[in-house]
Image (spheres, helix red, strand yellow):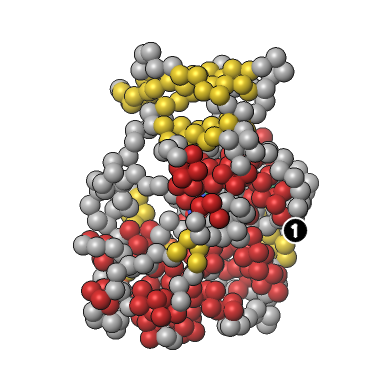
Amino acid sequence: MGKPTGFIEFDRKNKKELAVLERIKNFDDFHIPFDLKTQREQASRCMNCGIPFCQSAMKVNNRNVGCPLSNLIPEWNHLIYLGLYEEAYKRLERTAPFPEFTGNVCPALCEACCSCSINGESVGIKANELFLIEEAFKNGWIKPNKNIKRNGKKVAIIGSGPAGLSCAKRLNSEGFSVTVYEKDDRFGGLLMYGIPNMKLEKDVIERRIKLLTEEGIIFVKNTKIGYDIPMSKILKEYDEVVFACGTSMPRGLMCEGSDAKGIIFAVDFLKETTKNLLDNQDFKYNLKGKNVVIVGGGDTANDCCGTAAREGANSVLELEITKEPPLENTLPWPNYPNKKKTDYGVFECNELYGTDIRRYCTTIDKVNKDENGNIKSIITKKVEFKNGRFEDIPNTFLELPCDYLILAMGFLGTKDEDSKKYNLEANRFRYNLNNFSYDDKISICGDMKNGQSLVVIAINDGKMCAEEIIKKYN
Ligand SMILES: Cc1cc2nc3c(=O)[nH]c(=O)nc-3n(C[C@H](O)[C@H](O)[C@H](O)COP(=O)(O)OP(=O)(O)OC[C@H]3O[C@@H](n4cnc5c(N)ncnc54)[C@H](O)[C@@H]3O)c2cc1C
Ligand code: SF4
Ligand code: SF4
Protein backbone atom coordinates (compact mmCIF):
# COMPACT_ATOMS: atom_id res chain seq x y z
CA MET A 1 0.00 0.00 0.00
CA GLY A 2 1.06 3.59 -0.55
CA LYS A 3 3.71 4.77 -2.95
CA PRO A 4 6.83 3.20 -1.45
CA THR A 5 8.99 6.18 -2.34
CA GLY A 6 6.42 8.95 -1.91
CA PHE A 7 7.95 10.36 1.27
CA ILE A 8 11.36 10.45 -0.42
CA GLU A 9 10.18 11.88 -3.73
CA PHE A 10 7.90 14.62 -2.46
CA ASP A 11 8.45 17.24 0.22
CA ARG A 12 5.56 18.22 2.40
CA LYS A 13 3.63 21.17 1.04
CA ASN A 14 1.31 23.41 2.97
CA LYS A 15 -1.61 25.08 1.29
CA LYS A 16 -0.82 28.50 -0.10
CA GLU A 17 -2.41 31.43 1.70
CA LEU A 18 -3.48 34.84 0.45
CA ALA A 19 -1.03 37.61 1.35
CA VAL A 20 -1.76 39.31 4.66
CA LEU A 21 -2.76 42.69 3.22
CA GLU A 22 -5.16 40.94 0.86
CA ARG A 23 -6.76 38.54 3.29
CA ILE A 24 -7.42 40.99 6.12
CA LYS A 25 -9.78 42.89 3.82
CA ASN A 26 -12.48 40.39 4.79
CA PHE A 27 -13.26 37.47 7.10
CA ASP A 28 -13.16 34.76 4.43
CA ASP A 29 -11.06 31.59 4.49
CA PHE A 30 -7.69 32.55 3.01
CA HIS A 31 -6.27 29.10 2.16
CA ILE A 32 -5.92 28.01 -1.45
CA PRO A 33 -6.70 24.30 -1.96
CA PHE A 34 -4.16 22.06 -3.72
CA ASP A 35 -4.70 20.98 -7.29
CA LEU A 36 -5.51 17.27 -7.63
CA LYS A 37 -1.98 16.26 -8.68
CA THR A 38 -0.43 17.91 -5.63
CA GLN A 39 -3.12 16.48 -3.36
CA ARG A 40 -2.33 12.96 -4.57
CA GLU A 41 1.42 13.49 -4.27
CA GLN A 42 0.98 14.71 -0.73
CA ALA A 43 -1.16 11.68 0.14
CA SER A 44 1.48 9.42 -1.40
CA ARG A 45 3.96 10.58 1.28
CA CYS A 46 2.18 8.30 3.78
CA MET A 47 4.33 5.24 4.51
CA ASN A 48 1.40 3.10 5.70
CA CYS A 49 3.25 2.38 8.92
CA GLY A 50 2.85 -1.04 10.49
CA ILE A 51 1.93 0.74 13.71
CA PRO A 52 0.26 3.93 12.56
CA PHE A 53 0.80 6.29 15.49
CA CYS A 54 -1.19 8.94 13.61
CA GLN A 55 -4.45 7.14 14.38
CA SER A 56 -3.50 5.78 17.77
CA ALA A 57 -5.61 7.94 20.15
CA MET A 58 -3.06 7.47 22.95
CA LYS A 59 -2.11 9.52 25.95
CA VAL A 60 1.60 10.24 26.42
CA ASN A 61 2.57 12.24 29.51
CA ASN A 62 -1.16 12.69 30.04
CA ARG A 63 -1.51 14.52 26.72
CA ASN A 64 -3.38 13.36 23.64
CA VAL A 65 -1.22 11.82 20.95
CA GLY A 66 -2.66 10.65 17.66
CA CYS A 67 -6.14 11.22 16.33
CA PRO A 68 -8.66 10.97 19.20
CA LEU A 69 -11.23 9.65 16.71
CA SER A 70 -8.85 6.91 15.55
CA ASN A 71 -9.45 8.00 11.99
CA LEU A 72 -8.27 5.38 9.49
CA ILE A 73 -5.60 7.71 8.17
CA PRO A 74 -3.21 5.41 6.24
CA GLU A 75 -6.15 3.83 4.46
CA TRP A 76 -7.61 7.06 3.14
CA ASN A 77 -4.18 8.48 2.38
CA HIS A 78 -3.54 5.47 0.15
CA LEU A 79 -6.91 5.73 -1.58
CA ILE A 80 -6.35 9.43 -2.29
CA TYR A 81 -2.99 8.56 -3.82
CA LEU A 82 -4.78 6.04 -6.08
CA GLY A 83 -7.36 8.68 -7.02
CA LEU A 84 -10.17 6.60 -5.43
CA TYR A 85 -11.69 9.55 -3.62
CA GLU A 86 -15.16 8.17 -2.94
CA GLU A 87 -13.71 4.99 -1.44
CA ALA A 88 -11.37 7.17 0.61
CA TYR A 89 -14.31 9.22 1.86
CA LYS A 90 -16.14 6.00 2.85
CA ARG A 91 -13.19 5.11 5.09
CA LEU A 92 -13.12 8.61 6.56
CA GLU A 93 -16.83 8.71 7.41
CA ARG A 94 -16.59 5.46 9.37
CA THR A 95 -14.94 7.24 12.28
CA ALA A 96 -15.20 11.00 11.68
CA PRO A 97 -18.64 12.52 12.22
CA PHE A 98 -17.73 16.02 10.98
CA PRO A 99 -14.46 16.06 8.97
CA GLU A 100 -15.35 19.52 7.66
CA PHE A 101 -14.96 20.89 11.20
CA THR A 102 -11.80 19.02 12.15
CA GLY A 103 -10.33 19.42 8.65
CA ASN A 104 -10.46 23.18 9.22
CA VAL A 105 -9.76 23.72 12.92
CA CYS A 106 -8.08 20.64 14.40
CA PRO A 107 -4.52 21.19 15.64
CA ALA A 108 -3.78 17.87 13.89
CA LEU A 109 -2.65 15.74 16.81
CA CYS A 110 -2.21 13.03 14.18
CA GLU A 111 0.48 14.95 12.31
CA ALA A 112 2.51 15.64 15.44
CA CYS A 113 3.16 11.92 15.86
CA CYS A 114 3.32 10.89 12.20
CA SER A 115 6.39 8.70 11.68
CA CYS A 116 7.49 10.95 8.81
CA SER A 117 8.03 13.75 11.33
CA ILE A 118 10.74 11.80 13.20
CA ASN A 119 13.18 12.68 10.49
CA GLY A 120 11.45 15.30 8.40
CA GLU A 121 7.98 16.69 7.96
CA SER A 122 4.76 14.84 8.67
CA VAL A 123 2.20 13.84 6.09
CA GLY A 124 -0.38 16.62 5.57
CA ILE A 125 -3.19 14.55 7.02
CA LYS A 126 -5.53 17.39 7.94
CA ALA A 127 -5.47 18.81 4.39
CA ASN A 128 -6.30 15.33 3.05
CA GLU A 129 -9.25 15.10 5.43
CA LEU A 130 -10.66 18.45 4.33
CA PHE A 131 -10.14 17.58 0.69
CA LEU A 132 -12.15 14.36 1.07
CA ILE A 133 -15.13 15.85 2.86
CA GLU A 134 -15.37 18.76 0.43
CA GLU A 135 -15.19 16.31 -2.50
CA ALA A 136 -17.95 14.29 -0.83
CA PHE A 137 -20.25 17.29 -0.50
CA LYS A 138 -19.42 18.53 -4.00
CA ASN A 139 -20.10 15.18 -5.65
CA GLY A 140 -23.24 14.32 -3.71
CA TRP A 141 -21.72 11.30 -1.90
CA ILE A 142 -23.30 12.45 1.34
CA LYS A 143 -27.01 11.73 1.42
CA PRO A 144 -29.28 12.13 4.44
CA ASN A 145 -30.55 8.82 5.75
CA LYS A 146 -34.30 9.44 5.96
CA ASN A 147 -35.32 5.86 6.71
CA ILE A 148 -34.07 5.43 10.24
CA LYS A 149 -36.24 3.01 12.24
CA ARG A 150 -37.18 4.74 15.51
CA ASN A 151 -36.81 2.89 18.82
CA GLY A 152 -39.40 4.93 20.74
CA LYS A 153 -36.83 6.59 23.05
CA LYS A 154 -36.55 10.34 23.31
CA VAL A 155 -33.33 12.22 24.06
CA ALA A 156 -32.83 15.92 24.83
CA ILE A 157 -29.39 17.26 24.07
CA ILE A 158 -28.60 20.59 25.68
CA GLY A 159 -26.06 22.53 23.66
CA SER A 160 -25.34 22.38 19.93
CA GLY A 161 -21.51 22.58 20.03
CA PRO A 162 -19.40 19.79 18.52
CA ALA A 163 -20.04 17.49 21.51
CA GLY A 164 -23.82 17.91 21.39
CA LEU A 165 -23.95 17.55 17.59
CA SER A 166 -21.79 14.44 17.60
CA CYS A 167 -23.86 12.82 20.35
CA ALA A 168 -27.07 13.73 18.51
CA LYS A 169 -25.82 12.31 15.22
CA ARG A 170 -24.86 8.95 16.70
CA LEU A 171 -28.03 8.53 18.77
CA ASN A 172 -30.23 9.54 15.86
CA SER A 173 -28.55 6.98 13.62
CA GLU A 174 -29.49 4.29 16.17
CA GLY A 175 -33.17 5.26 16.14
CA PHE A 176 -33.42 7.58 19.14
CA SER A 177 -35.65 10.63 18.62
CA VAL A 178 -33.29 13.49 19.35
CA THR A 179 -34.02 17.14 20.10
CA VAL A 180 -31.07 19.55 20.36
CA TYR A 181 -31.69 22.70 22.41
CA GLU A 182 -29.50 25.77 21.91
CA LYS A 183 -29.65 28.99 23.87
CA ASP A 184 -28.11 31.08 21.07
CA ASP A 185 -29.72 32.18 17.82
CA ARG A 186 -27.47 29.92 15.74
CA PHE A 187 -26.30 26.32 16.17
CA GLY A 188 -22.71 25.12 16.49
CA GLY A 189 -21.50 26.35 19.92
CA LEU A 190 -17.95 27.69 19.74
CA LEU A 191 -17.69 26.48 16.13
CA MET A 192 -20.24 29.18 15.32
CA TYR A 193 -19.67 31.83 17.96
CA GLY A 194 -16.05 31.39 19.06
CA ILE A 195 -13.84 30.31 16.18
CA PRO A 196 -13.80 33.17 13.64
CA ASN A 197 -15.16 32.90 10.12
CA MET A 198 -11.73 32.94 8.44
CA LYS A 199 -10.85 29.72 10.31
CA LEU A 200 -14.23 28.05 9.84
CA GLU A 201 -16.75 29.57 7.48
CA LYS A 202 -20.17 29.49 9.01
CA ASP A 203 -22.06 28.05 6.03
CA VAL A 204 -19.99 24.90 6.63
CA ILE A 205 -21.80 24.50 9.96
CA GLU A 206 -25.18 25.37 8.50
CA ARG A 207 -24.68 22.77 5.74
CA ARG A 208 -24.19 20.07 8.39
CA ILE A 209 -27.15 21.22 10.52
CA LYS A 210 -29.38 21.01 7.42
CA LEU A 211 -28.23 17.44 6.82
CA LEU A 212 -28.81 16.42 10.43
CA THR A 213 -32.27 18.02 10.30
CA GLU A 214 -33.10 16.04 7.16
CA GLU A 215 -32.08 12.89 9.02
CA GLY A 216 -34.71 13.62 11.67
CA ILE A 217 -32.95 15.54 14.46
CA ILE A 218 -35.05 18.41 15.82
CA PHE A 219 -33.15 21.64 16.47
CA VAL A 220 -34.60 24.28 18.81
CA LYS A 221 -32.77 27.59 19.13
CA ASN A 222 -33.06 30.64 21.39
CA THR A 223 -34.02 28.30 24.23
CA LYS A 224 -31.95 28.14 27.37
CA ILE A 225 -32.71 24.97 29.28
CA GLY A 226 -33.17 25.55 33.00
CA TYR A 227 -34.46 29.06 32.25
CA ASP A 228 -36.80 29.08 29.22
CA ILE A 229 -37.78 25.48 29.89
CA PRO A 230 -37.37 24.14 33.45
CA MET A 231 -35.37 20.97 34.01
CA SER A 232 -38.42 19.29 35.58
CA LYS A 233 -40.25 19.51 32.22
CA ILE A 234 -37.25 18.21 30.28
CA LEU A 235 -36.77 15.30 32.68
CA LYS A 236 -40.45 14.39 32.39
CA GLU A 237 -40.55 14.57 28.62
CA TYR A 238 -37.35 12.69 27.71
CA ASP A 239 -35.92 9.25 28.46
CA GLU A 240 -32.36 10.61 28.40
CA VAL A 241 -30.89 14.08 28.88
CA VAL A 242 -27.38 14.95 27.67
CA PHE A 243 -25.68 18.12 28.86
CA ALA A 244 -23.16 19.46 26.34
CA CYS A 245 -23.18 23.09 27.45
CA GLY A 246 -19.44 23.80 27.13
CA THR A 247 -17.56 25.96 29.63
CA SER A 248 -19.44 29.20 29.83
CA MET A 249 -17.50 31.09 32.48
CA PRO A 250 -14.40 32.95 31.22
CA ARG A 251 -11.58 33.79 33.64
CA GLY A 252 -11.65 37.50 34.56
CA LEU A 253 -9.09 40.13 35.50
CA MET A 254 -8.37 40.83 39.15
CA CYS A 255 -6.54 44.12 39.50
CA GLU A 256 -7.24 47.75 40.21
CA GLY A 257 -9.46 49.26 37.50
CA SER A 258 -10.72 45.90 36.23
CA ASP A 259 -14.29 47.31 36.10
CA ALA A 260 -13.34 49.83 33.37
CA LYS A 261 -15.49 50.10 30.26
CA GLY A 262 -13.61 48.65 27.29
CA ILE A 263 -12.49 45.47 29.07
CA ILE A 264 -14.18 42.58 27.28
CA PHE A 265 -14.02 38.82 27.29
CA ALA A 266 -12.55 37.31 24.13
CA VAL A 267 -15.55 35.01 23.59
CA ASP A 268 -17.97 37.95 23.79
CA PHE A 269 -15.83 39.91 21.34
CA LEU A 270 -15.51 36.99 18.90
CA LYS A 271 -19.17 36.04 19.21
CA GLU A 272 -20.45 39.56 18.58
CA THR A 273 -18.09 40.03 15.64
CA THR A 274 -19.30 36.85 13.93
CA LYS A 275 -22.91 37.66 14.72
CA ASN A 276 -22.55 41.20 13.34
CA LEU A 277 -20.93 39.83 10.20
CA LEU A 278 -23.63 37.22 9.61
CA ASP A 279 -26.42 39.71 10.36
CA ASN A 280 -24.82 42.44 8.20
CA GLN A 281 -24.65 44.81 11.14
CA ASP A 282 -21.99 47.29 12.25
CA PHE A 283 -19.49 45.80 14.70
CA LYS A 284 -20.60 46.13 18.29
CA TYR A 285 -16.94 46.24 19.31
CA ASN A 286 -15.38 48.38 16.60
CA LEU A 287 -11.60 48.26 16.92
CA LYS A 288 -10.89 50.51 13.94
CA GLY A 289 -8.13 52.95 14.88
CA LYS A 290 -8.03 51.65 18.49
CA ASN A 291 -5.12 50.52 20.61
CA VAL A 292 -5.90 46.92 21.51
CA VAL A 293 -4.25 44.75 24.15
CA ILE A 294 -5.06 41.05 24.33
CA VAL A 295 -4.32 39.13 27.51
CA GLY A 296 -3.48 35.47 26.90
CA GLY A 297 -1.30 33.60 24.44
CA GLY A 298 -3.44 30.69 23.28
CA ASP A 299 -5.66 29.96 20.30
CA THR A 300 -8.39 32.31 21.47
CA ALA A 301 -5.95 35.22 21.80
CA ASN A 302 -4.64 34.41 18.33
CA ASP A 303 -8.19 34.53 16.93
CA CYS A 304 -8.64 37.94 18.59
CA CYS A 305 -5.43 39.15 16.89
CA GLY A 306 -6.70 38.07 13.47
CA THR A 307 -10.06 39.74 14.15
CA ALA A 308 -8.43 42.97 15.39
CA ALA A 309 -6.27 43.05 12.25
CA ARG A 310 -9.37 42.74 10.06
CA GLU A 311 -11.21 45.47 11.97
CA GLY A 312 -8.31 47.88 11.42
CA ALA A 313 -6.90 48.31 14.95
CA ASN A 314 -4.24 50.99 15.29
CA SER A 315 -2.04 48.73 17.40
CA VAL A 316 -2.27 45.23 18.84
CA LEU A 317 -0.24 43.74 21.68
CA GLU A 318 -0.53 40.27 23.15
CA LEU A 319 0.46 39.77 26.80
CA GLU A 320 1.44 36.29 27.89
CA ILE A 321 2.18 35.50 31.54
CA THR A 322 4.37 32.48 30.79
CA LYS A 323 7.90 32.36 29.40
CA GLU A 324 8.64 32.55 25.70
CA PRO A 325 8.54 28.94 24.43
CA PRO A 326 11.76 27.55 22.97
CA LEU A 327 12.39 28.13 19.27
CA GLU A 328 13.36 24.48 18.78
CA ASN A 329 11.13 21.64 19.92
CA THR A 330 12.17 20.26 23.31
CA LEU A 331 9.94 17.19 23.45
CA PRO A 332 10.78 13.93 21.68
CA TRP A 333 8.45 12.29 19.18
CA PRO A 334 5.58 11.32 19.53
CA ASN A 335 4.75 14.21 21.90
CA TYR A 336 2.97 17.26 20.56
CA PRO A 337 5.86 19.67 19.89
CA ASN A 338 6.80 22.19 22.57
CA LYS A 339 8.07 25.20 20.67
CA LYS A 340 7.12 28.75 19.85
CA LYS A 341 4.56 28.80 17.10
CA THR A 342 3.15 31.75 15.26
CA ASP A 343 -0.43 31.14 14.29
CA TYR A 344 -2.25 33.08 11.57
CA GLY A 345 -3.61 35.98 13.68
CA VAL A 346 -0.31 36.79 15.40
CA PHE A 347 1.46 36.39 12.07
CA GLU A 348 -0.88 38.91 10.46
CA CYS A 349 -0.38 41.42 13.28
CA ASN A 350 3.41 40.94 13.19
CA GLU A 351 3.35 41.72 9.48
CA LEU A 352 1.00 44.67 9.85
CA TYR A 353 2.67 46.34 12.82
CA GLY A 354 6.20 45.41 11.82
CA THR A 355 7.20 43.79 15.12
CA ASP A 356 6.49 40.67 17.17
CA ILE A 357 3.37 41.74 19.09
CA ARG A 358 3.91 39.20 21.90
CA ARG A 359 5.23 40.18 25.32
CA TYR A 360 6.14 37.21 27.51
CA CYS A 361 6.37 36.99 31.33
CA THR A 362 4.05 39.98 31.34
CA THR A 363 0.78 40.66 33.09
CA ILE A 364 -1.40 43.62 34.06
CA ASP A 365 -0.83 45.46 37.30
CA LYS A 366 -3.46 48.17 36.95
CA VAL A 367 -6.00 49.62 34.54
CA ASN A 368 -6.28 53.42 34.32
CA LYS A 369 -9.69 54.92 33.53
CA ASP A 370 -10.81 58.33 32.31
CA GLU A 371 -13.47 60.43 34.07
CA ASN A 372 -16.26 58.41 32.33
CA GLY A 373 -14.92 55.09 33.51
CA ASN A 374 -13.49 54.15 30.10
CA ILE A 375 -10.17 52.38 29.91
CA LYS A 376 -7.38 54.80 29.04
CA SER A 377 -4.16 52.90 29.60
CA ILE A 378 -2.77 49.85 31.37
CA ILE A 379 0.23 49.36 33.60
CA THR A 380 2.00 46.11 32.83
CA LYS A 381 4.61 44.32 34.91
CA LYS A 382 7.04 41.47 34.40
CA VAL A 383 6.64 38.25 36.39
CA GLU A 384 8.56 35.04 36.87
CA PHE A 385 7.35 31.61 37.89
CA LYS A 386 8.94 30.82 41.26
CA ASN A 387 7.97 28.62 44.18
CA GLY A 388 4.92 27.32 42.35
CA ARG A 389 3.45 30.73 41.51
CA PHE A 390 4.03 33.88 39.50
CA GLU A 391 6.01 36.52 41.38
CA ASP A 392 6.45 40.15 40.36
CA ILE A 393 9.85 41.32 39.12
CA PRO A 394 10.48 44.69 40.81
CA ASN A 395 10.71 47.93 38.81
CA THR A 396 9.28 46.54 35.60
CA PHE A 397 6.14 48.69 35.38
CA LEU A 398 5.28 50.06 31.96
CA GLU A 399 2.30 52.22 30.93
CA LEU A 400 0.72 51.42 27.56
CA PRO A 401 -2.16 53.18 25.79
CA CYS A 402 -5.21 50.95 25.59
CA ASP A 403 -8.76 51.51 24.29
CA TYR A 404 -9.81 47.87 24.37
CA LEU A 405 -8.47 45.19 26.69
CA ILE A 406 -9.52 41.73 25.52
CA LEU A 407 -9.32 38.90 28.04
CA ALA A 408 -8.45 35.50 26.57
CA MET A 409 -7.33 33.77 29.75
CA GLY A 410 -9.26 30.52 29.58
CA PHE A 411 -12.45 29.27 31.15
CA LEU A 412 -13.51 28.25 34.63
CA GLY A 413 -16.40 25.93 33.87
CA THR A 414 -20.13 26.11 34.53
CA LYS A 415 -21.60 29.04 36.45
CA ASP A 416 -22.95 28.06 39.85
CA GLU A 417 -26.37 29.53 39.08
CA ASP A 418 -26.58 27.49 35.87
CA SER A 419 -25.61 24.29 37.69
CA LYS A 420 -28.43 24.96 40.16
CA LYS A 421 -30.93 25.45 37.35
CA TYR A 422 -29.76 22.18 35.76
CA ASN A 423 -30.11 20.37 39.12
CA LEU A 424 -26.45 19.38 38.82
CA GLU A 425 -24.21 19.63 41.80
CA ALA A 426 -22.15 22.73 41.09
CA ASN A 427 -18.60 22.18 39.99
CA ARG A 428 -16.84 25.32 38.92
CA PHE A 429 -14.22 23.73 36.73
CA ARG A 430 -15.61 20.61 35.16
CA TYR A 431 -17.74 17.62 35.97
CA ASN A 432 -14.84 15.28 35.41
CA LEU A 433 -16.88 12.09 35.47
CA ASN A 434 -15.16 8.74 34.97
CA ASN A 435 -17.65 7.93 32.27
CA PHE A 436 -20.43 10.13 30.94
CA SER A 437 -23.32 9.29 33.18
CA TYR A 438 -24.12 11.73 35.95
CA ASP A 439 -27.10 9.72 37.13
CA ASP A 440 -29.65 7.24 35.70
CA LYS A 441 -30.99 9.65 33.17
CA ILE A 442 -28.46 12.45 32.82
CA SER A 443 -25.15 12.36 30.92
CA ILE A 444 -22.53 15.07 30.47
CA CYS A 445 -20.01 15.38 27.64
CA GLY A 446 -17.60 17.75 25.89
CA ASP A 447 -15.97 20.77 27.51
CA MET A 448 -18.61 20.81 30.23
CA LYS A 449 -17.26 17.47 31.45
CA ASN A 450 -13.57 17.80 30.58
CA GLY A 451 -12.87 21.51 30.90
CA GLN A 452 -11.79 23.56 27.90
CA SER A 453 -10.35 21.35 25.22
CA LEU A 454 -10.45 20.80 21.47
CA VAL A 455 -13.13 20.34 18.85
CA VAL A 456 -11.92 16.83 17.98
CA ILE A 457 -12.03 15.82 21.64
CA ALA A 458 -15.53 17.25 22.06
CA ILE A 459 -16.66 15.35 18.95
CA ASN A 460 -15.17 12.12 20.23
CA ASP A 461 -16.67 12.69 23.66
CA GLY A 462 -20.15 13.21 22.20
CA LYS A 463 -19.79 10.02 20.23
CA MET A 464 -18.61 7.98 23.23
CA CYS A 465 -21.40 9.41 25.38
CA ALA A 466 -23.93 8.29 22.76
CA GLU A 467 -22.39 4.79 22.79
CA GLU A 468 -22.96 4.55 26.54
CA ILE A 469 -26.60 5.51 26.14
CA ILE A 470 -27.06 3.07 23.24
CA LYS A 471 -25.60 0.26 25.41
CA LYS A 472 -28.20 0.92 28.10
CA TYR A 473 -31.05 0.13 25.71
CA ASN A 474 -29.55 -2.95 24.05
C1 LIG B 1 -12.14 31.41 20.53
C2 LIG B 1 -11.94 29.93 20.57
C3 LIG B 1 -11.23 29.34 19.55
C4 LIG B 1 -11.04 27.98 19.55
N1 LIG B 1 -10.35 27.43 18.52
C5 LIG B 1 -10.20 26.10 18.47
C6 LIG B 1 -9.53 25.50 17.37
O1 LIG B 1 -9.05 26.18 16.47
N2 LIG B 1 -9.42 24.15 17.35
C7 LIG B 1 -9.95 23.37 18.33
O2 LIG B 1 -9.85 22.14 18.23
N3 LIG B 1 -10.58 23.91 19.40
C8 LIG B 1 -10.73 25.25 19.48
N4 LIG B 1 -11.38 25.81 20.55
C9 LIG B 1 -11.97 24.92 21.57
C10 LIG B 1 -13.29 24.29 21.07
O3 LIG B 1 -14.05 25.26 20.40
C11 LIG B 1 -14.09 23.68 22.22
O4 LIG B 1 -13.26 22.76 22.89
C12 LIG B 1 -15.35 22.95 21.71
O5 LIG B 1 -16.17 23.82 20.97
C13 LIG B 1 -16.15 22.37 22.89
O6 LIG B 1 -17.31 21.81 22.40
P1 LIG B 1 -18.60 21.61 23.31
O7 LIG B 1 -19.64 21.07 22.40
O8 LIG B 1 -18.25 20.84 24.52
O9 LIG B 1 -19.00 23.07 23.82
P2 LIG B 1 -19.35 24.42 23.06
O10 LIG B 1 -18.77 24.47 21.71
O11 LIG B 1 -19.00 25.49 24.02
O12 LIG B 1 -20.93 24.38 22.90
C14 LIG B 1 -21.81 24.45 24.00
C15 LIG B 1 -23.15 24.96 23.52
O13 LIG B 1 -24.10 24.82 24.57
C16 LIG B 1 -24.97 25.95 24.55
N5 LIG B 1 -25.61 26.05 25.86
C17 LIG B 1 -24.99 26.30 27.05
N6 LIG B 1 -25.92 26.28 28.05
C18 LIG B 1 -27.11 26.01 27.48
C19 LIG B 1 -28.43 25.86 27.99
N7 LIG B 1 -28.71 25.96 29.30
N8 LIG B 1 -29.44 25.61 27.12
C20 LIG B 1 -29.20 25.50 25.77
N9 LIG B 1 -27.96 25.64 25.24
C21 LIG B 1 -26.92 25.87 26.08
C22 LIG B 1 -24.00 27.08 24.23
O14 LIG B 1 -24.68 28.24 23.78
C23 LIG B 1 -23.14 26.44 23.16
O15 LIG B 1 -23.70 26.62 21.88
C24 LIG B 1 -11.57 27.18 20.60
C25 LIG B 1 -12.26 27.79 21.64
C26 LIG B 1 -12.45 29.15 21.64
C27 LIG B 1 -13.16 29.80 22.76
S1 SF4 C 1 -9.49 14.90 13.40
FE1 SF4 C 1 -7.61 16.03 13.83
S2 SF4 C 1 -6.25 14.50 14.73
FE2 SF4 C 1 -7.91 13.39 13.67
S3 SF4 C 1 -7.19 12.99 11.59
FE3 SF4 C 1 -8.31 14.91 11.53
S4 SF4 C 1 -6.75 16.48 11.80
FE4 SF4 C 1 -5.85 14.55 12.49
S1 SF4 D 1 2.18 7.81 10.91
FE1 SF4 D 1 2.33 9.13 9.06
S2 SF4 D 1 3.37 7.89 7.56
FE2 SF4 D 1 2.68 6.49 9.17
S3 SF4 D 1 0.64 5.75 8.50
FE3 SF4 D 1 0.29 7.59 9.71
S4 SF4 D 1 0.23 9.28 8.23
FE4 SF4 D 1 1.20 7.54 7.22
Q: Nearer the viewer, residue 410 or 375?
A: 375
Q: Name the residue rendered at 36%, 13% in the picture.
A: 394
Q: Residue furthest right?
A: 228
Q: Nearer the viewer, residue 227 or 198?
A: 198
Q: Position of residue 277 (x, y in %)?
A: 70, 52
Q: Position of residue 153 (x, y in %)?
A: 67, 68
Q: Name the residue rendered at 38%, 58% in the picture.
A: 109
Q: Find residue 126 and report its image quarter.
A: bottom left
Q: Find residue 402 and report its image quarter.
A: top right
Compared with 194, 50 (above or below) is below
Figure quadrant of the C terminus: bottom right
Q: Position of residue 224 (x, y in %)?
A: 73, 47
Q: Find residue 114 and report its image quarter.
A: bottom left
Q: Is residue 98 left or right of residue 175?
A: left
* The residue carrying mark 1 has its beta carbon less than 8 Å from ligand 1: no
Q: Amino acid at mark 1?
A: Val
Figure quadrant of the N terminus: bottom left
Q: Nearer the viewer, residue 62 or 42?
A: 42
Q: How many marks?
A: 1
Q: Position of residue 435 (x, y in %)?
A: 47, 54
Question: Callout 1 environment at 10 Å: few (<14), some (14 to 19), or many (20+)?
Answer: some
Q: Is residue 429 left or right of residue 54?
A: right
Q: Nearer the viewer, residue 334 or 325?
A: 325
Q: Name the residue rendered at 28%, 41% in the picture.
A: 326
Q: Name the residue rendered at 58%, 31% in the picture.
A: 291
Note whether residue 376 is visible.
yes
Name the secondary structure under disc 1: strand
Note whether residue 467 is visible.
no
Compared with 157, 216 (above or below) is below
Query: Which residue is identified by label 1?
Result: 220
